[in-house]
Amino acid sequence: MKRTWIGLALAASAVAAFAVAGTTPVAEAHHGDVVGGIAAAVRDANSRGTAAAVSFFDRVSGQYADNGDLAKAHFGSASVVKVFIADDLFYRSWRGEVGMSDFDWQQVDVMLRSSDDAAASRFWSRLGGPAIVDRIKARYRLNQIMPPISARWWGLTRLTSFDMSLYYARMINGEGGLPGWLANGLLERMAAFTDRGTDGFYQRHGIPDGLPGESPKAVKQGWMCCQYGLRTINTTGVVGPERRFIIVVFAHDQATGSTYQHTQESVTRIVQRMFPGGRVPRPAEHNPFGAVDAVAVDPTRMRFQVSGWAIDPDTAAPITAHMSVGGMRFNLGPAAGSRPDLVRFWPWAGPNHGFTGGGPMPGGTWDVCGFAINAGPGEGDPQVGCKRVTAPQRPFGSLDGITPVAGGVRVWGWVTESELAGGPSPAHLYVDGRAYDLGWALVNRPDLAWTYGAWGTAHGFDKVMPVAAGTHQVCVRGVDLRTVVGDNELGCRTVVVP
């Protein structure tokens, strides 16, 4: 089982192959566990005696996944090759190399929509038979497809799921030279497939029956028996809005002791196990969600407190919550607080998904926002809500510690004022109510960069101040320099000086 990302290693050929024009691959985009889904699907098929090659490609994110070596193995095309026949006909007609009558257009319709063999044979003979496959291979830079050994039998064209995925991607993006309006015409005919072929064969196996929630579905199916002693069922196509997802499943059973229905069921089960919900999950459907319930501001101590909740749909375990003030981020840790009210709506998740937290509050009006940190598949860490709050223009900061030393106390922390635009603030020490000047808070505090970096990081203080032996109440205040609202007491401790 392999998973491939654009620019990473399937092989050098795969890197070049799926660098699809017009897409911007991301580091990783998820559709549930598509790699695990393919593995489970292939195991299920194998347990039924069905061998299968499976490929999946997301044209938007660039995610490609397959089932390893079998995706590069040859399978009989059966009627899937009719897509190549139509492509070659459209392309050469557009270039003026062959003509197309009204009857030809009707025959293309019935060949693609209802998999008509007579129409395919007519075009195959007219356009040069195996030369069609050679031209498609050259135009789309495909390395693995092969024309049939017997020139007469178009259904014995040899395909791989990897190359078929690549063909669809390049055809849609115009990389094989087929104009967009003709590519659209080809795909629209595939999307108008009939439930049964002109031979009466049921052709909703695989993608159509396996993805009832997807629309549109432009598919080309295949079936044949009993070349090389095998019974073949194929499902291929492009599904979803903007033709986002390409799915290819080639499968066969031993012809002796099997039926078409059995292999069709295996192929449909493969698609169902890849996407159990009946559609390809979009990455955003795996995003965590939640809410910011309240934000409280203490204007005297210049601190805020936020509360809310966050749940990830891919796990019942608590996930991490972050918050921001004016765009600066804080890690609140696991959202694991008891919230029994959530069980009514998400019973599978349990109650332990609440978060609370807070910190120093800068003066001014700010949006305080919460973020749920993705625990698995999904796109980023979504914002779960914001509250706008206002705090007075006073110094803000933190008294990180006060410890007694011989003949005094050591005090450290940080303080600044939003009105100073990153400039330094002074701090005062109070011992039993008596003030001492700690000077300017100028010590660099790199740890502030993530949370309060908008106001700079050189706002620390770390001083040893002489204090008489005994028990003392020691406090630190940030001194208000601009709009005189008042100093801010950063904190107090009771200490015993030896």
Image (cartoon, helix red, strand yellow):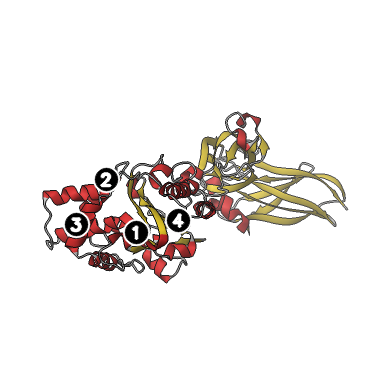
Q: Give the camera-side residue of 421 and 204.
A: 204
> Which is nearer the N-term, disc 3 or disc 2?
3
What is the CA distance from the residue labelled 4 to the residue labelled 2? 25 Å
Q: Decide which of 479, 413 is in the foreground and name it.
A: 413
Q: Residues within 10 Å of mark 3 (few under 14, many from 20)?
A: few
Q: Amino acid at mark 1?
A: Ser
SS label for mark 4:
loop
On the rendered structure, is 106 left or right of 62? left
> Alpha-carbon neighbours of circle 4 within 10 Å: few (<14), some, or many (≥20)?
few
Q: What amino acid is found at the position of numbered circle 3 in the picture?
A: Arg
Determine which residue is flagged by label 1. Answer: 77
Residue shown at 53% from the left, 45% from the top: 419
Judge depth for marks 1 and 4 and give the one in front.
4
Q: Viewer-nearest of labels 4 and 3?
A: 4
Q: Are marks 2 and 1 in contact (CB under 8 Å)?
A: no
**Real-space Cα separation, disc 1 to disc 4, in angstroms:** 20 Å
From mark 3 to mark 2, how far is it between C-alphas? 15 Å
Which residue is depicted at the point 66% across and 49% down?
Answer: 427
Per the image, the residue denoted by label 3 is 122
Question: Residue 439, percent across and down?
Answer: 67, 54
* Amino acid tagged 2: Thr
Mark 4 or mark 2: which comes first in sequence? 2
